[in-house]
Structures are given as structure tokens and as C-alpha cells.
Amino acid sequence: MDPGATDNVGESAINIQQLTQMAYSALQSGNNVLAKSLFEQITASDKAETPHWLGLAYASFNLGDEAATAGAVDQALELHPQNLRAIILKADLLKQQGQSRQSLKYYQYALRLAENAQNIPADITQGLARAEEVRKTQVGDYRSFLMEQIESRGFTLNAGNRRFQQSLELMLGEKEIYYQNPSRFYYPALPQIQFYEREQFDWVAEIESRSPEIRTELTAVMNDPSRFSPYVKKGGGQLGRDNKGLEDNDDWSALFLWDYGRLVTEVADLFPNTLQALEAAPLPHITDQAPMALFSKLAADTQIPPHNGLLNTRLICHLPLVVPENCGALRVGNEQRAWAEGELLIFDDSIEHEAWNSSGQERVILLFEIWRPELNEEERQLITTLLEAVKAFNEG
């Protein structure tokens, strides 16, 4: 090997390092002409890396040289496609050139990449704030245009086309997509529906009509604090992630009628009308597992943290009985609904959900589970047999 060649390589490396320092010093001091010239010397060699192309792009952008900016930033992205500075600069350039739709794609990409990033430098944080502002503006313009087109065809958005409205919100990035994720048993090919509508079930009217009787039975025991006990027991892991201080806490308490498939006889005697009303619903009966039916009491200013239920073969029903003003809501996936006394809320609890009572008084509902309507009788019997067999095996 020629010793001189080794010296030349070392000398070249030193020159690149010196040129880089000089170029970034010029860029930081605002001497964009010198910075551009120095970065061009580096990129003309075979030693150029992402920071060099990005430096050239910044200097060119500051000088208003759009063609040079585009060429340099594209080279930086080719070397490092997820470089946030390069992505934001590309978006800024496209926006400056009037290519708003293309710039939005890059801004949105930068925002997605930064979602889980930590210790983001100040200049990138500023760029992300700019990206968010552009996203809001352009998505707002986009929504307005789409709504004008929809309304010009004679359509209006109302409760009857709730699914379409949700599709629009998902398309615009205003909501996230949530999927069933039960912690114990997943049954495939069931529709991803967050809230079911009351009108879909012929038994709902019967139970709702019994609300006054149920409330009367509940009122008779409400003043006896010994009847209710904490819903989340220490070590039970009911929420699966973060119990948020609700373990052994009466802020979220329950009075069970059916508890893991066992009728609580000492309680059942106090609620004959309630149990009779529940006979109208398709409750699952699985030995030592289902049904579950209880009065759920949520204290003032209390939040139940996000969690997923055990199974996606059931739905959970809330019959609101005591709902103070400004009580709060139940969120399932990307949708939230408020409780209204005597009107059932029916939802898939295998999708992430949470609830909160932001009022100054307690909220009480009758909570119970039902079979999903999509399951036929044979499937229900098979699932029952399977879950009972799993429990028998686990108990040895």
C-alpha cells in the first residue's frame, strides 16, 4: 500500500471535518452564502453524509434557492428517511411553493414520527408546532370542502348516519381507530362496533320501562353503606393496567346481583323487580363465570381509567338510575356518550373504554352483560362449553 495514499485519506477526513465546522458556524451566524459554498464543497466529494446535505438545504432555503433546497433535502431524506429536520424542511419548502396538499403529507408524517419521541430539540419542537398548525388549518379547509359537497347533494349529518360521520372523522385524522382486544378470550370475525344502538334490540324497551321499579328497589338500600363494596379488589387486577388508586376504594363500588354466574341470594331477595326485568335480556349463563349483574356506584369527581374487558363475545349494558347534572361520560374507543336516566347504553367492553363522574354527586347504574347479537345459538353453546372446560382444566 502506498503510504502517501493513507496520508491523503487522513488529510481528506480532516478537511471534511474542518469544512463541516466552518460551514455550520457560518450557517449559525447567518452567513448563508458562505455556508452554502462550504456545504457544496463537501457534497461534491464522496464523503457527504445526511448532516451535510441538510446543512446545504437550510442554507439554500434561507437564500431563497428553492431548486437547491429541494435537491439537497431530497438527498438527506434518501440517506435518512425518518430525519425529522429534513421532513419538516421538505414540508416547509412545499408549503412555500404553494403545494399545500403535498406539504400536509410531510407535516403529518413528522407529527406521527414524533408521537413517541423524547427530548426533542427546540428547533424541531418549533417545526412540529408549525406542522400542527398547518394540519389544523388544512384539515379544517378539507372538511369544509367535503361538507359542502355532501350537503350540495342534499345530505345532512344526523344520528341516522353516525357510522358515516365516524368514517369522516377517521379519514381526517380527528379520531383514532380502536380494535377489540379482550384480555382473556377473543372470538374472530365479529364486527368492530363501539356502541350499539338501543333500537337494535327488541328487549330494551321492556327493561327501560322497569327503570322506576328498579330505582325504587335501589333507593331502599342506598343509605346502607355496608351493601356496597369496592369494585376493584386488591390483587384482583380487574383493570389490567393502572387501577389509579381504585383498589379497595369505595369511590367505585358495587352491589352484585349476579357475581361470576352465582345469584347472590341475600341481595336478590331485595331486588325481585330488577331480576325479573333482567330476564328479558339475553344474559349468558356460564358456570361460575356469567352472568354478571350489579349496581355500579361512582363517587363524585372519580375516574375509571382506560381498560379492556375479558371477552369480545359479550356486550356490556348500562341502565342509568342516578345521574346528576354534568355527570361526565363513558368513552368507548374514539366515541363518548353521556348517561341519561332510564336509557340503556350498550357497548363492546373488549374495546378500550373509560368512564368519569365530574359532578359533585354520585352516579349509579345497573350494569349487566349480554350475548353479542351476532352469535347464533350453536356458537353460544360452544363458547359456553369451551369456557367452562378452560375453567375446569385450570382448577386441576
Image: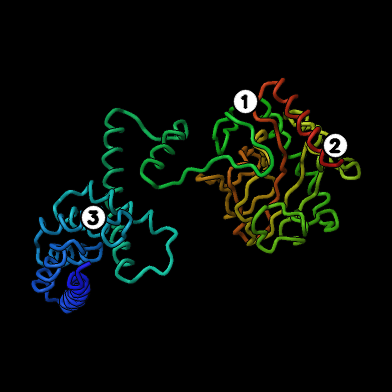
- What is the CA distance from the residue labelled 3 to the residue labelled 1? 46 Å
- What is the CA distance from the residue labelled 2 to the residue labelled 3? 66 Å
User: What's the amino acid at mark 2?
Assistant: Pro
Horizontally, is 176 left or right of 57 in the view?
right
- What is the CA distance from the residue labelled 2 to the residue labelled 1? 30 Å
Q: Secondary structure at mark 3?
A: helix
Residue 13 visible at all: no
User: Badge 3 is on which residue?
Assistant: 91
Q: Nearer the viewer, mark 2 or mark 3?
A: 3
Horizontally, is 391 left or right of 340 in the view?
right
Of the numbered discs 3 and 1, the one sitting upstream in the chain is 3
User: What's the amino acid at mark 1?
Assistant: Glu
Asked whether 145 or 108 is in front, the reply is 108
Q: The N terminus is located in which quarter? A: bottom left
Asked whether 162 or 274 is in front, the reply is 162
Task: Give neighbour class at mark 3: few <14, some 14-19, many 20+ (Cα, 10 Å).
Answer: many
x and y percent of residue 287 in the render? 83, 34
User: Badge 1 is on which residue?
Assistant: 374
